[in-house]
Amino acid sequence: MKVSGDGTSIVEDGRQQLVVEVRDRYNNPVSGATVHFTLAGAEQGTSHELDNGTTTGEAVQVTTGADGQASVTYHLDSVSGNGDDVTVRVSIDDIPPMGGSFDTDRKETLAFSLAAVGQSGNGNGGNGDGGDGGDGGGGDDGAQTPQVEFRVDDLSHPNEDKMNYVASYDVSNTNGSFERVNVVYDNVNRGSSATGTRSATTMHGSQQYQLSYGASEQWKMTVQVIYERSDRTE
């Protein structure tokens, strides 16, 4: 089975739905599968939870529906300093640990890497195996941290080893210096020898990336929000 998902940046006192999709070896959605979510890495100054009917939000179990999808809602209550990197670990085998090592190279696991930022817009760009909240930037209209919603659909044909990913994105909270959105596809197994970028000047859309190989390998997708500076450079 495969697990795919998306990630984004979360502004203080905000919520973000985390969605995973479980598919079998023939790329069909799997219903009735148990998906385990664990709220793992974060600094002590961050107050947050996974809100899905649990009191602490530290570990949640969700059953996939007919579409093979399971989801939880991440709630960022508050974050101190300039922001925090948050990790939500996912597994269809067992409950992922809150600390220590976690193997995300397996098809049965996934780690969302989220960026928790304050109301002022300070923080780090978030990224994950499912997605990335890309580069915030200044510009003619002042600094704003863009908000990115990101989803990846795996349409690959594993029996033919043909990779086919469709990345859908929705970018908001930009300013007048917004130029474009890049979706970068990186093959984790092959490194820089297998990478590609798809670009668009719209803040809402999708980008498809296909290759004649790589369906059985791990890929990382990154969304980059590109601003044009006042001197017309990026």
Image (cartoon, helix red, strand yellow):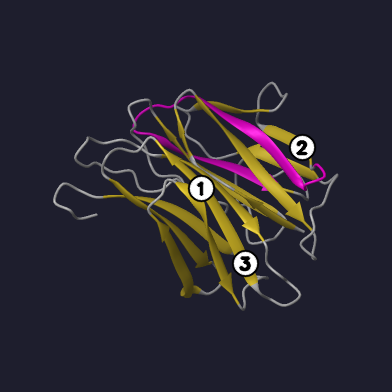
Q: Which residue is mark 2?
A: 62
Residue 133 placement (x, y as % from top left) = 45, 45
Gap in angstroms between the C-alphas marked 3 and 1: 17 Å
Q: Which residues are magenta?
A: 65-90
Which sits earlier in the primary sequence, circle 2 or circle 1?
A: 2
Amino acid bearing label 1: Tyr
Quarter holding the N terminus? bottom right
Cα distance in 3D space between marks 2 and 1: 24 Å
Q: Which mark is residue 169?
A: 1
- Three-letter amino acid code at the position of disc 3: Asn
Q: Are marks 2 and 1 in contact (CB under 8 Å)?
A: no
Q: Are marks 3 and 2 in contact (CB under 8 Å)?
A: no
- First reached walking from the N terminus: tag 3 or tag 2: 2
Q: Dot 3: what SS?
A: strand
Query: Which numbered disc, 3 or 2, marks the residue closer to the eye?
Result: 3
Q: Does the stretch in magenta take in 107?
A: no
Which residue is identified by label 3? 164
Name, please, the residue furthest toward the right: 32
Residue 97 in view, yes or no = no
